[in-house]
Image (tube, rainbow, N blue to C red):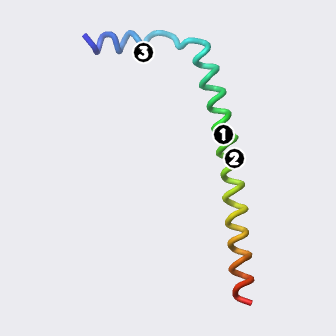
Amino acid sequence: MKEVSKLNKEQQPPVQGSIEALRAENERLRMENAYLKKLNALVREQEKLQTKLKRK
């Protein structure tokens, strides 16, 4: 019985509001990912500069 109801849910088209919410969340996560990549690059660059200063 549970398998039949699961199949029915998969066959129904998704609700429009849920699609928009997922798109908005996807865009937010993409922006967060880009921000974190830039932050990571800055931190690595600062660490690299600090190791150069310590060597001198």
Q: Nearer the viewer, mark 2 or mark 3?
A: 2
Q: Is residue 3 left or right of residue 46?
A: left
- Distance, label 1 to label 3, CA atoms, is 27 Å
Alpha-carbon neighbours of circle 3 within 10 Å: few (<14), some, or many (≥20)? few
Quadrant in the picture for the C terminus? bottom right
Name the residue: 53% across, 14% down: 14
The amino acid type found where label 2 is placed reads Ala
Q: Which mark is residue 30?
A: 1
| Residue 2 percent across, percent down from the top left | 28, 14
For the N terminus, give its image quadrant: top left
Q: Taking 24 as reference, is 44 above or below it?
A: below
First reached walking from the N terminus: tag 2 or tag 3: 3
Disc 1 to disc 2: CB gap under 8 Å: yes
Residues packed near mark 2 inside 10 Å, few (<14), some (14 to 19) or many (20 plus): few
The quarter of the picture where residue 17 lies is top right
Numbered circle sitting on residue 10:
3
**Which callout, 1 or 3, points at the residue further toward the start of the chain?**
3
Q: Residue at x 70, y 61 (%)?
A: 41
- Could you tell me which residue is drawn at 73 percent across and 62 percent down? 42
Q: Is residue 44 above or below residue 21?
A: below
Residue type for callout 1: Arg
Residue to which mark 2 is pinned: 34
